[in-house]
Image (cartoon, rainbow, N blue to C red):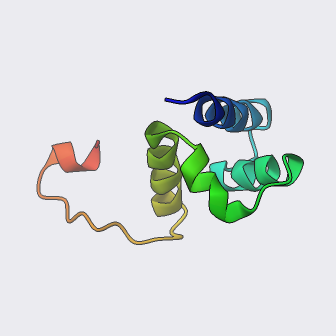
Amino acid sequence: MNNKRLEASISIEKLVRDNPDLTYIEACLKYAEANDLEIKLIPKLISPHLKEKLYNESIKNKCVKSNIKPTSLNDFIR
């Protein structure tokens, strides 16, 4: 992982940790604004692990539909 990706991911994670009411999406927006970045650059700057957290948060908040049709208990705890 390159330094910019690591720095962005750590900064976004820290924003969420320090502000419990802040979602990962909101933290990404704050990070982009604070660093004068276009929001479309954020996916290139965050780690795959953080992308997974964003996706899961979006499903939880019903912002996107899950493509997974659970067939077992393991699918629920993915």
Quarter of the rendering occupied by the C terminus: top left
- At 62% from the left and 27% from the top, the residue drawn is 3
Question: Where 31 falls versus 16 (above or below)?
Answer: below
Q: Position of residue 12 (x, y in %)?
A: 69, 38
Total of numbered circles in the picture? 0
The answer to which quarter of the image holds residue 77 is top left
- At 68% from the left and 50% from the top, the residue drawn is 23
Q: Position of residue 70 (x, y in %)?
A: 19, 59
Q: Position of residue 17 (x, y in %)?
A: 71, 31
Which residue occupies the extreme front position in the image? Answer: 2
Frontmost residue, 38 versus 78:
38
Image position of 63 (left or right of 33):
left
Image position of 68 (left or right of 71):
right
- At 78% from the left and 52% from the top, the residue drawn is 32
Frontmost residue, 14 versus 35:
35
The answer to which quarter of the image holds residue 65 is bottom left
Frontmost residue, 16 versus 8:
8
Q: Position of residue 7 (x, y in %)?
A: 68, 30
- At 76% from the left and 45% from the top, the residue drawn is 21
Which residue occupies the extreme left position in the image? Answer: 71
Question: Where 37 falls versus 65 (above or below)?
Answer: above
